[in-house]
Image: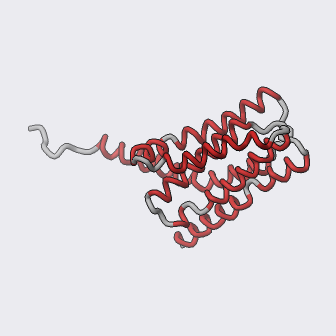
Amino acid sequence: MAAGLLGLCNWSTLGVCAALKLPQISALLAARSARGLSLPSLLLELAGFLVFLRYQCYYEYPLMTYLEYPILIAQDVILLLCVFHFSGNVYRAAPYIALFVASWFVLTLQKWIMDLAMNLCTLISAASKLAQLQCLWKTRDSGAVSALTWGLAAYTCAVLTRFVIMLALNLWVTATVLRYRKTAVKAE
């Protein structure tokens, strides 16, 4: 039963990720504008995805543990091109794409570089969300930002929330056990 539930969560997350950015891409194309979408947010998200994918490949994890990341990266590159297209200069995307390609190789020059980058991945991901929020707060205009895309992204995180809650509770139990553990040597 548990294995089946885990499989369902894995496949549903993969399915959602396969279509995650499609509503955003569609909204940009329909609006013919990238108004409301934060370029720094998109770049940070893409950087985080690339680091995570490279880490998984570097340490030879099974493909099913990171299959959604190449799909997400492809969708983010399309979004990046759309943002630059609608801002009037698609060629401005070239330096960013070159930087990401170079980073793919630089990350594996030394093991410590790869490990450090992976340790910063959560911070990079959080920064991307904060950059999007900052853009929305500053402009007070969601423009062509897709609520469906962000809702789907929340679903992919919600699947993992259970594990975070269980981690916190298990750590709490561990700390409580250690706190109330009787010493092996009793005072006489």
Task: Tell me the residue at 57%/72% (across/down).
Answer: 4
Closer to us: 184 or 93: 93
Task: Tell me the residue at 61%/64% (across/down).
Answer: 9
Q: Quadrant of the N terminus?
A: bottom right
Colour mapping: secondary structure
Answer left or right for 38 relative to 115: right
Callout count: 0
Q: Quadrant of residue 16?
A: bottom right
Q: Name the outermost residue toward the top.
A: 138
Answer left or right for 117 relative to 43: left
Task: Tell me the residue at 62%/51% (across/down).
Answer: 157
| x, y percent for residue 124 | 57, 39
| x, y percent for residue 46 | 64, 46
Q: Name the outermost residue toward the left.
A: 188
The answer to whether 184 is drawn above or below residue 136 in the figure is below
Closer to us: 187 or 103: 103
Closer to us: 188 or 51: 51
Answer left or right for 130 relative to 181: right
| x, y percent for residue 149 | 76, 50
Closer to us: 182 or 34: 34
Q: Quadrant of the C terminus?
A: top left
Q: Quadrant of residue 10?
A: bottom right
